[in-house]
Amino acid sequence: MGISRETDDIFANTFGSLRQHVNPQLWASPSLVTFGRQSTEGLGKSPEEYFKGFGFDQVDSLDVSDFEGCSIVHDLNDPVPVQYHQKYHCVFDGGTMEHVFDIKSALFNAHNLLRAGGVVVHANPVNNQTNHGFYQFSPTLLLGFYGQNGYRIVRLILTSRIKGGPIQKVLDIGESQALSLALAQRIVFPLSFTSDYLTSMLFVAVKPEVHRDPVVPQQPFYADRFADQQFKKYKRILML
């Protein structure tokens, strides 16, 4: 859980471009909360300094204990207290959710922490990170949950790298391609990807400008709303 020299470029690009995706009237004195207090030791600055460098006036961190110096002690397996609902302009999960057993609770918490019109950013493992956490995630988890809760999917990047090596972009999609990926039955990675390659995803979505209680999604591939003939072209195996 952290931002290193290897990942700094991709996160800096992500946070540097957030404002272009949001309604500026809703972003006065912006605030950010991270799941877990991110490690930024390799960058020579604290996580609070790092995120304030992108224009956030308030930076909080939420964790199950204060061992790493978080500002809010809370277990993401449980609903966040109402006092934190709709408090933050950005919620950043930089590799924490896979360590939370109750994924539904973690996603509902992200939604409830976020202000209407705010941005959620996830960076989570996809493949070849066995036993790193409780889970590895398919992109359809985030595409399904946030898509069916009315979020606008801004970007989804699949990256792969050998541990300690440079990041390679495997797939980089924007808003117009999100449906195609969400409805893919399966994603097949190149045969050249061995067990040395760690595959992750970076996901960015904008919350609707009216807050509603979160709903549990159906996987898009099986959802009734995508059963029409017009979606048949999207329901296929993606070969990367």
Image: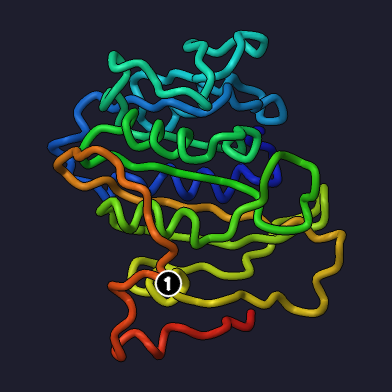
**Measuring 64% from the left and 60% from the top, which residue is drawn there?**
159
In the image, residue 127 above or below residue 44: below
Q: Is residue 208 left or right of residue 214?
A: left
Crowd rating for badge 1 (residues with CA inside 10 Å; few <14, some 14–19, many 20+): few
**Measuring 56% from the left and 19% from the top, which residue is drawn there?**
63
Q: Tell me residue 95's x, y (percent).
A: 61, 39
> In the rendered image, which residue does mark 1 sit on?
222
In the image, residue 140 above or below residue 70: below
**Residue type for callout 1:** Tyr
Q: Is residue 161 left or right of residue 140?
A: right
Pick whichever, 71 or 235, lies toward us.
Answer: 235
Q: Tell me residue 188's x, y (percent).
A: 67, 77
Q: Secondary structure at mark 1?
A: helix
Q: Tell me residue 175's x, y (percent).
A: 34, 66
**Measuring 16% from the left and 43% from the top, which residue is drawn there?**
209
Q: Give the quadrant of residue 45.
A: top right
Q: How many marks?
A: 1
Q: Give the quadrant of residue 189.
A: bottom right
